[in-house]
Image (cartoon, rainbow, N blue to C red):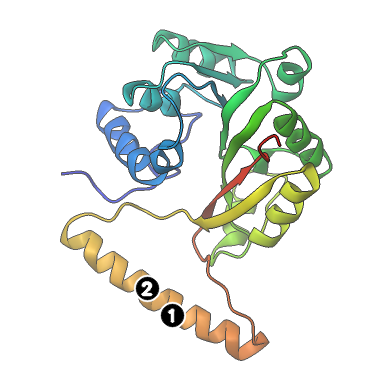
Amino acid sequence: DLPDVEFSQAGKKEDLDIAPSRIKVLHYWFSKSMLPFFHDRKKTDAILDIGCGQGLFLQFLKSAGFTNLSGIDVSREQIELARKRGLPVEEKDARAFFANTDNLYSVITALDVIEHIPRDELLTLFEKIFEHLLPGGRLIVQTPNATGLFSNQVIFDDLTHHSILTPASFRQLAESAGFTDISCMESTSSFRGWKGFCRKLLWRSVVFAARMARIAETGKKQTIWTENMVCVCRKPAAR
């Protein structure tokens, strides 16, 4: 029986020793939270994972049948671990990688990455991602949610965090780079068992109270309350 977990709880990408049981949990979360965004993609489509770490998400995609995978990360230790998993990865940051490749991708992912990039460099990164996506290509991002209930803890608990976005500021960033069909959603745990059922009910109660407080104070509605959010956008198809 798998515990309730989300990606950031199951083991950080920089952790060098993640137990097989935790990898199993991660794969379960990937199957529920990430795989639906790949259902309209071919198994041979080119996929790039920025900040791939030791390749846990790439390994999941490989197990799901995707064959044209690649990843980049700035950590030599992480890249060595990914290579031991038999994954095609490079030790490069995104700027150096995009400056030296003409490859185009059907999907580019960046899970728990953009918060580590200075705000004044984000637009350049998104423009480069846009440039290296095929028409109709998709960008999938998970990042801390600045409108979450514990956003201050998320941004200040890690000295390498530079940027924290709201759904609205993510949309502004993506639109500025040329993306369309932009959507943000909660990045939730995969609740399982009776404990998960109780946690889910408690979370819904907390969110209801927070939503009422938000409306009472500002008259505004808010839909994304989780610590992290998943944001997806698309490069327009060629006409």
Instruction: Tell me the residue at 59%/57% (across/down).
Output: 145
Q: Quadrant of the C terminus?
A: top right
Instruction: Tell me the residue at 55%/85% (across/down).
Output: 213
Q: Position of residue 78 (x, y in %)?
A: 51, 19
Q: Mark 2 points at which residue?
A: 204
User: Observer-nearest residue: 188 or 160?
Assistant: 188
Residue 68 vertical position relative to residue 157 in the rendered view, above or below = above
Report the Cα–Cα distance between label 1 and label 2: 6 Å
Q: Mark 1 points at which residue?
A: 208
Question: Outermost residue toward the bottom?
Answer: 216
Q: Is mark 2 on a helix, strand or loop?
A: helix
Q: In which quarter of the image is the N terminus?
A: top left
Instruction: Tell me the residue at 64%/87% (across/down).
Output: 219
Q: Position of residue 80 (x, y in %)?
A: 50, 10
Label 2 near label 1: C-beta < 8 Å? yes
Q: Is mark 1 on a helix, strand or loop?
A: helix
Q: Where is residue 64 in the image (x, y as percent from the top left)?
A: 33, 26
Neighbours of disc 2 within 10 Å: few (<14), some (14-19), many (20+): few
Neighbours of disc 1 within 10 Å: few (<14), some (14-19), many (20+): few
Is 193 left or right of 125, judged from the image as shown?
Answer: left
Q: Position of residue 135 (x, y in %)?
A: 66, 32
Is 96 left or right of 160, judged from the image as shown?
Answer: right
Mark 2: amino acid? Arg
| Residue 16: mark | none
Residue 97 vertical position relative to residue 160 in the rendered view, above or below = above
Task: Please indicate, yes or no, whether residue 199 appears anywhere in the rendered image.
Answer: yes
Question: Outermost residue toward the right?
Answer: 120
